[in-house]
Image: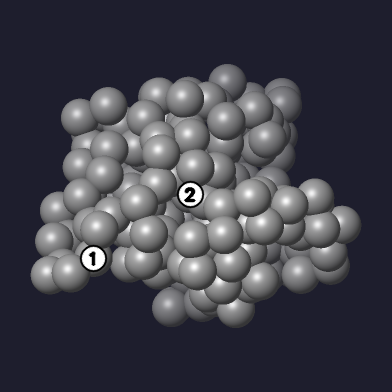
Amino acid sequence: MPSAARGSVSACRIQHAVKGVKNALRDISDDTVKLVQGFEGLPDGDPTTVNLDPYLDPVGIWTIGWGHAIAWQGHWLRGSENRPQAQALYPGGISRDQAETLLHGDLVDAGRDVSLACAVPLSDNQFGALVSFTFNLGINNLRSSTLLRKLNQSDYAGAADEFPQIGRAHV
């Protein structure tokens, strides 16, 4: 589930040190934030209001800001029938700054998961691409992917070749 925000992204660090994990402590770079923001856009569920309001994403999950999935009672809030609940969880919507704070927290969570799943060293750009993947598709999809299998076998080129395949997959 998404976590609460933790300050600015450039100041965020994953404080989850695990013995033997090469990527256990990583910054979420501004480039990674911009990458995710570029893919996500900043939709507004009700453009007639001043703030950003919840919207239904393409897979039917209520979302707010830059792809922050809305959880309620331990589950993702799904379906158009749950619009009143999504609006009740964010009465009056959120500001752009609040959307950025939510995104930062979500990316820290995704970065922690990537760090734990990868057994090889990653450049900042490689790490950022995997954080974006995990933010969008989830850690379980990364863990079960051919991309991660190849990457953890130090087949960096083979792992990179998997990205276009993922773009066409129906997850």
Q: Is residue 136 left or right of residue 164?
A: left
Residue 54's label in the rendered image is: none
Residue 131's label in the rendered image is: 2
Q: Position of residue 36 (x, y in %)?
A: 57, 36
Contact (Cβ within 8 Å) of mark 2 with mark 1: no
Identify the residue at horizontal 73%, vertical 57% (top origin). 162
Q: Nearer the viewer, residue 117 or 37?
A: 117
Q: Position of residue 113 (x, y in %)?
A: 38, 63
Q: Element at badge 1?
A: loop
The correct choice, above or below, for 68 with respect to 33 in the image is below
Residue 97 at least partly seen: yes
Q: Quadrant of the C terminus?
A: bottom right
Q: Quadrant of the N terminus?
A: bottom left
Q: Element at badge 2?
A: helix
Q: Is residue 168 left or right of residue 75?
A: right
Q: Nearer the viewer, residue 129 or 4?
A: 129
Q: CA distance from mark 2 to mark 1?
A: 16 Å
- How many marks on residues? 2
Identify the residue at horizontal 17%, vertical 60% (top origin). 16
Identify the residue at horizontal 37%, vertical 30% (top origin). 29
What colouring does the structure picture have? one colour
Q: Position of residue 59 (x, y in %)?
A: 77, 62
Q: Amino acid at mark 1?
A: Val
The correct choice, above or below, for 72 with respect to 33 in the image is below
Q: Is residue 87 left or right of residue 40?
A: left
Would you name the residue on which mark 1 appears?
A: 21
